[in-house]
Image (spheres, rainbow, N blue to C red):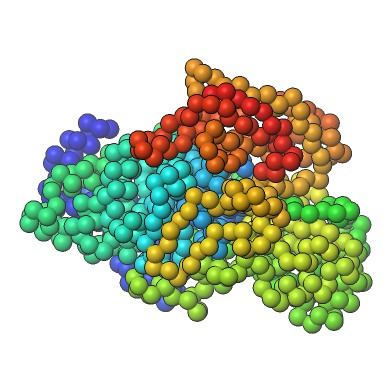
Amino acid sequence: MYRQATEILKKLSLREKVGLMSGHTSRKSIHGALKGTTGVHYNEYPYSAGGNPEKGIPAVEFCDGPNGVVCGRGKSTCFPVPMMRAASFDTELEEKIGAAIGEEILAYGGNLFGGVCINLPYHPGWGRCQETYGEDDFLIGEMGKAMVRGVQSTGVIACLKHFAFNQMENNRFRVNVVCDKKTEREIFLRHFEKCVKAGAGAVMSAYNSYQGVMCGHNSYLLNDVLKEEWGFDGFILSDFTWGVRDTVEAANGGQNIEMADTLYFGSRLVQAVQEGKVSESVIDDAAFRIIYTMLRFDNIRREAFKGLKKQNRISTAGMIKKSVIGCKSHRQLALRSAEEGCVLLKNEGPVLPLSRNNRKIAVFGRLADTPNTGDRGSARVYPEYTVTIIQGILKEVSEDAEVIYYTGKNLSHAKRLMKEADAAIIVAGYDYYDEGEAISRDQSTPEKGSFAGGDRCGLLRLHEDDEEFLEKTAGLNSNTIVILIAGSMIIPGKWIEKIPSVLYGFYGGMEGGRAIARVLFGKCDPGGRLPFVIPEKEEDLPKLDFSANEVRYQYWHGYRRLKHLGKKAMFPFGYGLSYTTFKLFGVEAEFDREHLKIRISANIQNTGKRTGETILQVYVKTPENDSVFCIKGFKRVKLEKDEEKEVQIEIEKFDLEIWNVEGGFFHLLPGKYNIGVGFSSDEKQWNILECLV
């Protein structure tokens, strides 16, 4: 591939090389689609860039995500949001979802998936938290790496986004982010590096600035770190339309493709080269990266088609069948993912699972009867159907059961219904009006109002009407279940003390309502564990002004911040209940000096009365001063009643290293490493060991 790409490059003129760096879709059509003023929705068809058929160079055909493939209408499989998929702690399942997404992209005629969002939510109020894999860089890196493997197994290029420091919506076009080097490398860039080294073929730069330089022009991030230090051999593309704002700065800063239209590259870039403002070697580097990557993945795709042909997914014309889009096996993956992502926070009694013998079930809340797959910005997927929670419940109850649905608008009426019911289910939380991408009319004014979404400024609890309803109905029915719907953290109010059962349902995709109902009635175990901490109060979180023009990110955030401050969590990171119980014993740890990794082995037994799943989690505290326990390993385990398994987890050197501020490199610090093994980040429940490195 390298030699072939080199030979092709030699035959290209300057204009042809620059042509490879140019998007072909007008910003007017893209923004009109986002606002609903055109006959098609955003990315209804793949967005094209570059390409030169006469010279054998395929065009980039961009398909957005991350909840599935944004292309098409009423066809694509809509998976749960990545935050819910992160709650599964299931990298094998995420890889399968990635492969399914890759297949659907190919069926749409695409070849690049722009939906591997691995930005770390510094604060849970970020509107697009739902698009990433939790609050911890290790979890994000592992899940992101799995998505990269899955997508690229089909020959589709996985594009990581948004590089880097993209943690707010409302002011994303203006904000400048600053932080110290240790925070930069260990917290905000390490998981990007992991996914790059997993072979990701493309990276999308971010809108915001870092250290005073726009990320789409940032030579330190794009040239020094990404290309030189990490050895990234793929290509970089800008975030759409406003990701490039200067021809010379962007080209010299390491940008390779201006997406999805061309304003600053194209003829302006040719002129800049002719005037000596941009060296042609910069253009050669960008063009080579594009040619090499497109040829490499074209080859991978041909190999992938051999396997797909055996599965009868290739047509006689040699193309992947359109019937792959939204097919049964992909919908089953979506259902499984939603089941594995439901997190049971509380279950006194136990109230759950509900018996099918319940004669009358009362369901409350507007969101119970609302198709609610999350953000409706660039991440919106258009499936054939979306199962609501009430539809899922009606499918699971017995034929002679009575299900009463009421929004709860009249409190007196709701109280009466609740008292008369055998069980009461209250659905509360958010939708795309409350959180999501902030769609903007121009590069300086984030648009709100009718274009909903954006950051959850000051909204980490339920809406006032939901809080009031829960406060005034709590205790009326001893079999009350609250289902929380959101893309990230909700801090429960005082009502949680009087509610016996609470289930976190996230945005569960097209099968979300069915999955929640199956969990409620015990068809499956609530398989999720929190991919973020829930503190007792907002003040325990980092302060962040979502309207600021400059923000400084600190080292401590999420569960690590609470540990650093000695604060107790309402629900710790990694927490979640099962319908059964588990016993952990025989925990051992050893350091492999030859391969520089820590090996953990442990035995888990299902001590309950039914099949269940749990997540074994390993937390490590390095010898560094001021260190806290951080998750460095996990494994999902399914056990039948009374079954026992030995589980092994390896912690790689990469995940043990810390940043040497003076030397400017990562290194493995020698000394005593404390290791906590358990089922959440709650240290009181751990087996604690020591390991000399």
Name the residue located 13 percent from the left edge and 48 percent from the top edge: 279
Name the residue located 89 percent from the left edge and 70 percent from the top edge: 476
Q: Is residue 643 above or below residue 247?
A: above
Residue 512 x %, y %: 66, 57
**In the image shown, does 555 or 91 lie closer to the viewer?**
555
**In the image shown, does 246 or 376 lie closer to the viewer?**
246
Q: How many marks?
A: 0
Name the residue located 84 percent from the left edge and 31 percent from the top edge: 642
Name the residue located 61 percent from the left edge and 58 percent from the top edge: 540
Instruction: Look at the image and tell me whether residue 291 can be seen.
Output: yes
Residue 610 x %, y %: 84, 39
The N terminus lies in which quarter of the figure? top left
Instruction: Look at the image and tell me whether residue 106 can be seen.
Output: no
Q: Residue furthest front?
A: 625
Q: Residue furthest left?
A: 275
**In the image shown, does 274 or 660 lie closer to the viewer?**
660
Residue 600 x %, y %: 63, 26
Question: Seen in the image, is 249 located left or right of residue 312?
Answer: left
Question: Seen in the image, is 503 located left or right of residue 271?
Answer: right
Residue 481 x %, y %: 80, 61
Residue 666: image quadrant is top left
